[in-house]
Each structure stands twice: as structure tokens, then as C-alpha cells.
Amino acid sequence: MAIVIDWPPAVLYAARLTFKAPVSGILWLPEIEYPCLTGRVFMDLSGRFADGRLIRTSEVRELIEEGDYTIARTCGRSHYLLVEARGNSFAGLRRLPRVRPFLSGSVH
């Protein structure tokens, strides 16, 4: 049985755009898991991932800014267009910042 995935409006909008840098997939709501990104992938040209699947990218080598968007180039030679619900929190960055994962609970 096929599963229907609702594409977020921001992903549908971004899918219509053309970029100078290659785009091998769209990463929806990307989050940093240094040195990688996680998010839901759409339009994966490699055919490895179904639309809407949660993935973790290879190590991000570079962030390329084009217009209002950022493209993440990975060491696996993928280029993910980073799409968020509003804005671009990666604007102005050339590399991923080293952030510590959130730790819940108390430290003893």
C-alpha cells in the first residue's frame, strides 16, 4: 500500500526554483547534528530516500548561499537545499557551527 506524504508549502515553493549550485535533494527543517544535518528529505535525485523520510546527511563540508536559501555540500558529494518554515537560519554561514547536543536531566 502506498503512503501519501503531504509536502510542506515551503518545500513545494522551493522545488520550483532554479539554483546555480547543483541540488540533489531538499532537506526540510534541517537541524545541526555536528558535523552533519538531520531533516526530512524530498526530491532525492539519488533515489536512496523516499519523500518525507528522516535522514542524517554525510559530513557537511560547505554551506553555499543562493538568494534566500542555503545549500549544504556534503563529503558524500550531495547538495541539499535547506528549507525551513520561515526564514533561513543558515544565512551568512559558510560552515556548520560546532554546537553541543542538548542534554536533559542533571549532571552529577
Image (tube, rainbow, N blue to C red):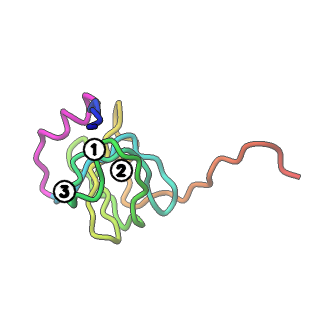
Magenta region: which residues?
A: 8-20
Measured Cα–Cα span from mark 3 to mark 2: 27 Å
Residue named by callout 1: 51
The earlier-in-sequence mark between 3 and 2 is: 3
Of badges 1 and 2, nearer the viewer stands 1
| Disc 1 to disc 2, C-alpha distance | 28 Å
Instruction: Residue type at mark 2: give it.
Output: Gly
Residue 15 falls inside the magenta stretch: yes
Q: In this view, does 60 lie above or below 6?
A: below
| Number of residues whose C-alpha sits closer than 10 Å to that of mark 3, classed few (under 14), some (14–19) or many (20 or more) | few
Foreground of the two, 81 or 89: 81
- The structure residue drawn at horizontal position 35% and vertical position 31%, both measured from the top left corner, is 85
Q: Position of residue 84 (x, y in %)?
A: 35, 37
Residue denoted by label 2 = 92
59 and 52: which is toward the camera = 52
| x and y percentages locating residue 34 in the rendered image | 51, 60
Residue type pointed to by label 3? Leu
Graded by Cα atoms within 10 Å as few (under 14), some (14 to 19) or many (20 or more), the crowding at tag 2 reads few
Q: Nearer the viewer, residue 24 or 46?
A: 46
Q: Which numbered disc, 3 or 2, marks the residue closer to the eye?
A: 3
- Image quarter where the N terminus lies is top left
Q: Nearer the viewer, residue 53 or 35?
A: 53
Mark 1 vs 2: CB contact within 8 A: no
Q: Which of marks 1 and 3 is nearer the N terminus?
A: 3
Mark pair 1, 3: CA separation: 11 Å
Whole-percent x and y of residue 89? 40, 42
Three-letter residue code for mark 1: Asp
Residue beneath disc 3: 45
